[in-house]
Image (cartoon, rainbow, N blue to C red):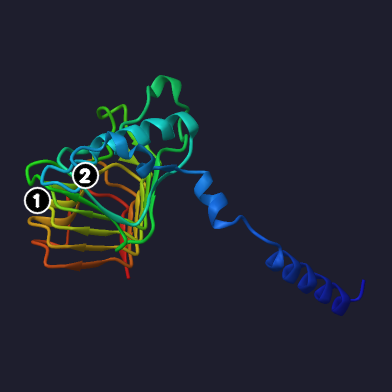
Amino acid sequence: MPIMRRVLTAAALTVLATCLPGPSFSQVLADVVSVTDFRDQALDVGGEEEDWQPAFQAAIARAWETRQPVYLPAGEYHIRRAIEILPPDTEKRPFGADGIRLVGAGMYKSVIFQSVETENCVNWTGLEYEKSDSRGQLEDISLRGGDITLNIKWHNQFKMDSCYIEGGARYGVYAEGWSSRFLNSIIRWCGEAGIYGGGHFNNCIIRDCYFSRDGIGILLSGVHGSRIEG
């Protein structure tokens, strides 16, 4: 086939692939576990003691069963206890298996508020040092408040992308584990540090993030092979 004809054929296939209809938004939403589907388990919604934590726990439990992402629609969700995302029995879970994916409608649109300063906002941790969690994903969402806003101790290959983390009394993100990625996010108003990385915080990347009004932007201890870029 002449070179020009091959080029035109490849271009036509590219246009065809681009024009083919993808999944509709309703189809995408049908393939997730929505936190609001468990609204009946939230406590005192709209009141002074509002606590969506039980609804989050129910959605996470369902997501482990179905292997679907957890979706948080736009809105503000107050909690009074930490959301716990723990791995299933590691003896039954193959190494490198996908973890929970928690995704919102946008970094300023889907907001989780921890109303109790002494509680963490989200504990996305392993069970212990040698029973770590792996491959969790947090995207397009805002976490605010608490002692540690996002606690990912004993968690490897975590990915945080396009998130807004604000107001941790101690840390915005507390991370121990290797090969994690923190991308395109904003971390603000955290007392001791925006991100703390230690305990085998190796081969990790912090890229294109913005730090503001934190005691220290990024605090690292005992780190090997990690990079801060952009």
Q: CA separation, marks 2 and 1?
A: 28 Å
Q: Is residue 85 visible?
A: no
Question: Is residue 205 depicted above or below 158 in this figure?
Answer: below
Answer left or right for 68 relative to 207. right
Residue visible at 7% across and 42% down in the picture? 118
Three-letter code, disc 1 = Arg
Q: Quadrant of residue 205?
A: bottom left
Find the residue positioned furthest to the bottom.
Answer: 4
Earlier in the chain: of badge 2 and badge 1, it is 2
Answer left or right for 28 relative to 101. right
Q: Dot 2 lies on which element?
A: loop
**Dot 2 and dot 1 residues touching (CB under 8 Å):** no
Q: In the rendering, which numbered label is found on residue 29?
A: none
Q: Nearer the viewer, residue 196 or 227?
A: 196
Find the residue positioned furthest to the right.
Answer: 1
Q: In the rendering, which numbered label is found on residue 170?
A: 1
Q: Dot 1 lies on which element?
A: loop
